[in-house]
Amino acid sequence: MHIQIDMFSPLYYSTLGFDADLIDYLSFIKDEYIRFLFPRPILDPRGRKPWDAVILFRMHVLYFTRPEFVSFRQMCTELAKPKHQDYRNFL
């Protein structure tokens, strides 16, 4: 009897910082499902490039699951800092 275990590479774990919640998200929520829910591009009201629905959805997952982010705007500012590289990799 042969059992196959689907495991992510060590590089995958190191880029997400061994964060179990983010790894579970990527395991159970597929990008195709989010794109199915939002089939049209999400247009920027300022006329810039449209936003990707998957990235916006993942940003909201971070915002609602991480206590260190008190507002969406503050989260966007914090993501630019080097200490949040794992969150940027997630997005």
Image (spheres, grey):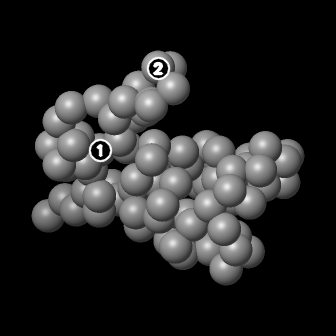
Instruction: Please indicate whether residue 20 sits to the left or right of residue 33 in the image.
Output: right
SS class of the residue under badge 2?
loop
The x and y percentages for residue 17 are 68, 59
Instruction: Please indicate whether residue 81 sits to the left or right of residue 86 in the image.
Output: right
Q: Which amino acid type corresponds to the residue marked 1 in the rendered image?
A: Asp
Q: Residue at x 15, y 43 (%)?
A: 36
In which quadrant will I find the N terminus?
A: bottom left
The x and y percentages for residue 12 are 56, 47
Q: Residue furthest front?
A: 46
Q: Which amino acid type corresponds to the residue marked 2 in the rendered image?
A: Gly
Please state which of residues 21 and 11 is positioned toward the viewer in this rendering: 21
Residue at mark 2: 47
**Mark linked to residue 31:** 1
Q: How many marks?
A: 2
The part of the image, by quadrant, that contains residue 27 is: bottom left
Is residue 40 in view?
yes
Frontmost of labels 2 and 1 is 2
Please state which of residues 46 and 71 is positioned toward the viewer in this rendering: 46
Q: Residue furthest bottom?
A: 67
Classed neighbour count for the residue bearing mark 2: other residues with Cα under 10 Å, few (<14), some (14–19), many (≥20) = few
The x and y percentages for residue 41 are 29, 30
Q: CA distance from mark 2 to mark 1?
A: 25 Å
Q: Is residue 20 above or below residue 74?
A: below
SS class of the residue under badge 1?
helix
- Return the disc, 2 or 1, that comes first in the chain's sequence: 1
In which quadrant will I find the C terminus?
A: top right
**Mark linked to residue 57:** none
Q: Residue at x 85, y 46 (%)?
A: 82
Q: Is residue 64 above or below residue 62?
A: below
The x and y percentages for residue 19 are 60, 67
**C-beta proximity under 8 Å, tags 2 and 1:** no
